[in-house]
Amino acid sequence: MLDSLNFSETTSNILTSWSGSPILNGPYGAVQQLKFSNGTSMNINTIANPNARGVIWKTSSSQSTANIMCAISTLGTGRICIIGDSSPCDDGTGSSGHTLYPGWTELGTNHSRLFINSSLWVAKLSGVTSVENNNSAPVSFKLEQNYPNPFNPTTKINFSIPKSEFVTLKIYNSMGKEVNTLVSENMTSGNYEYTFSGMELSSGVYFYRLSTPDYTETKSMTLIK
């Protein structure tokens, strides 16, 4: 529920400690900082909907059910993301004489990543390009080599899962630090293809790891810019 209390947030926000967040670590890159020139926060009721969770909180807040700047939830097969920004898609252009707040492109903030990651997650894309052969389930887990490889800036990653499982597909740099989460959800059996963008990353060797409760496999890929 939006509380309709206007505020300007120009200092450090509180980001969720949930490392697998598809919003903060989505296919368009990591979200590390926001800036609301004007907006409102919200409260969530986890009793009414236990799937609701905060993603970003106002400065000096705890990761509780109040003072939330961005929240997500699922209900049945549906998804929702709420962001209390007054000008979410303002790119700094517009009619002469209008006051503009270009949060979308402002240096030091990640509005564009937040909104694109959110849109992909709500649309159940999250970088997914295709799902095939669900009528004939794969007989085993399999993680394919990405293609093209080397790549710049996008590449495709294919994998197969033979049964319904909670699946993660994460990207790591050569130091073992997680730099992106492409998948973190329950998935049905099938063959999947995801597109990964290295637009925000530097050239080098990266690793992608597919994990389920019954299977883990890691492969390497090379980004050349």
Image: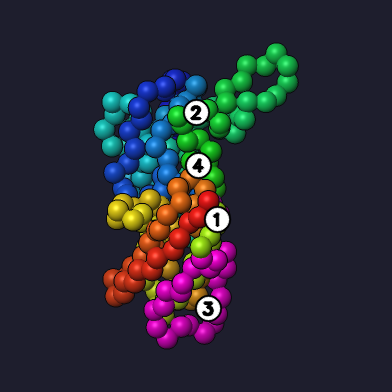
Judge whether 155 appears above or below 119 on screen. below
Observer-nearest of 84 and 48: 84
The range drawn in magenta is: 120-149
Q: Secondary structure at mark 4?
A: helix
The answer to which of 31 and 224 lies nearer the viewer is 224
The single residue placed furthest to the left in the displayed view is: 62
Q: Amino acid at mark 1?
A: Asn
Distance CA(mark 2)–CA(mark 4): 13 Å
Q: Is there any visible trace of residue 109 in the rendered image?
A: yes
> Along the polypeptide, which appears first: circle 3 or circle 4?
4
Q: Which residue is mark 4?
A: 113
Task: Give the CA separation, mark 2 to mark 1.
Answer: 24 Å
- N-terminal of the pair, mark 4 or mark 1, is 4
Q: Position of residue 75 (x, y in %)?
A: 45, 54
First in residue order: circle 3 vs circle 1: 3
- Name the mark nearer the viewer: 3 or 1: 1
Residue in view at x 57 percent, y 64 percent = 129
